[in-house]
Image (spheres, helix red, strand yellow):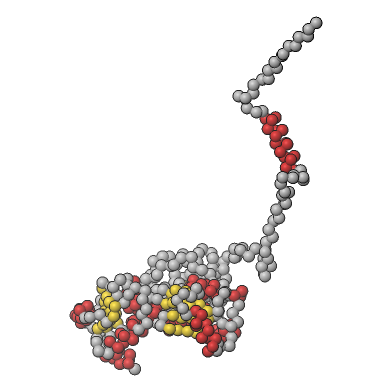
Amino acid sequence: MMATHFRTRIRFPDHSNKKPSGYFFFICRFISKSLSESSYDPPFTPVSKLRKAKKKKTHDGNSNSNEKPTLPLQSDLPFDFFYSYSETNPSVNPIGYRESPKFSPFGPGRLDRKWTGTSAPAVVEVKINEVLEERKRILGDPLSEEEVAELVEQYRHNNCSRQINLGKGGVTHNMLDDIHNHWRRAEAVRIKCLGVPTLDMDNICFHLEDKSGGKIIYRHINILLLYRGRNYDPKNRPTIPLMLWKPYAPIYPKLVKNVADGLSFDETKEMRNRGLNSPPLMKLTRNGVYVNVVDRVREAFKFEEVVRLDCIHVGSSDCKQIGVKLRVLVPCVPILFKDEQIILWRGKKDHEEDMNS
């Protein structure tokens, strides 16, 4: 009997259009997890556990060196804080303020000193003798001529990386922090002076030495070299709170009077017209070097009664600052500021005799 074979077709259900069930995902996740946790995985190297970075300890024992300082900041600097030390005269009181004195440029609650509108006076009484002894100790023995020549040769060039530009703001408060930052890695810092403060370089040198505690070892026209001292320790540098913004300048009494002292109204008007029609003594540029302006004006007053300075493109604010400085340094009487022209009057004869004596 011949055997007959029957082919039976088994049809599986078509799940191509159906989404896989949650049970299928659970099985795949369980298998992948068990494979990844196995210690033996030939194609790949075992992954080592990441170690947490240890926080570096500072010399004070703190866990983090970038911690924010405690507020308010306390500074032991033995002088009152001004925005500009060289361009501010503490003896002249303002007659008004353009912003309320309660808005301190150091920020709210960031300084233990009260802002008065022009300065932040020191809270603790200053002991001058102790301050002078400490500065003398930091400066150490005076530099020899060879050491000074070596430092000058290293920092006097224009491509020096340790340079601070001093502009019309003069010796500002935040500049002191820049000086100490340079002193961390360099023995001296090169300071290039430009603008109105160069009328009185002696004033700039005094405030740089007085406020920073350094020593001017080189001076050539408008270039200064400020030395930090033999025993200077960057780790023990003073705390200098920074000003967060430039405060508005207060309102001072009027610089030019309608009628100059010692002259009548007609004489004052005649002097102004003579000054405007006279040739300019000098032509000043913006952010220039005005080192020889005072001497030139003094020499001109020996022969002329009125002098005109051409300050085109200098700016009205800089013109007034120049007039304020010349009034004290020459001395003289500014009688007109017009169209960026400064008209200076030498004053009466008795004033001239006092100037020569």
Tell me if residue 150 comes above or below residue 99 in the rendering: below
> In this view of the protein, which residue sits in the foreground, 307 or 114?
307
Q: Position of residue 84 (x, y in %)?
A: 44, 74
Q: Residue 166's image quarter?
A: bottom left
For the point 39% across and 79% down, the residue is: 198
Residue 265 vs residue 56: left or right?
left
Q: Quadrant of the N terminus?
A: top right
For the point 34% across and 73% down, the residue is: 286
Q: Position of residue 204 (x, y in %)?
A: 44, 80
Q: Position of residue 255 (x, y in %)?
A: 32, 76
The total of numbered circles placed on residues is 0
Question: Looking at the image, can residue 302 be seen?
Answer: yes
Question: Looking at the image, can residue 256 be seen?
Answer: no
Tell me if residue 103 comes above or below residue 356 in the rendering: above
> In this view of the protein, which residue sits in the foreground, 171 or 194?
194
**Residue extending furthest top?**
1
Q: Position of residue 130 (x, y in %)?
A: 58, 84
**Residue extending furthest bottom?**
357
Q: Quadrant of the C terminus?
A: bottom left
> In this view of the protein, which residue sits in the foreground, 219 or 306?
219
For the point 53% across and 84% down, the residue is: 150
Q: Residue 17's image quarter?
A: top right
For the point 34% across and 71% down, the residue is: 317
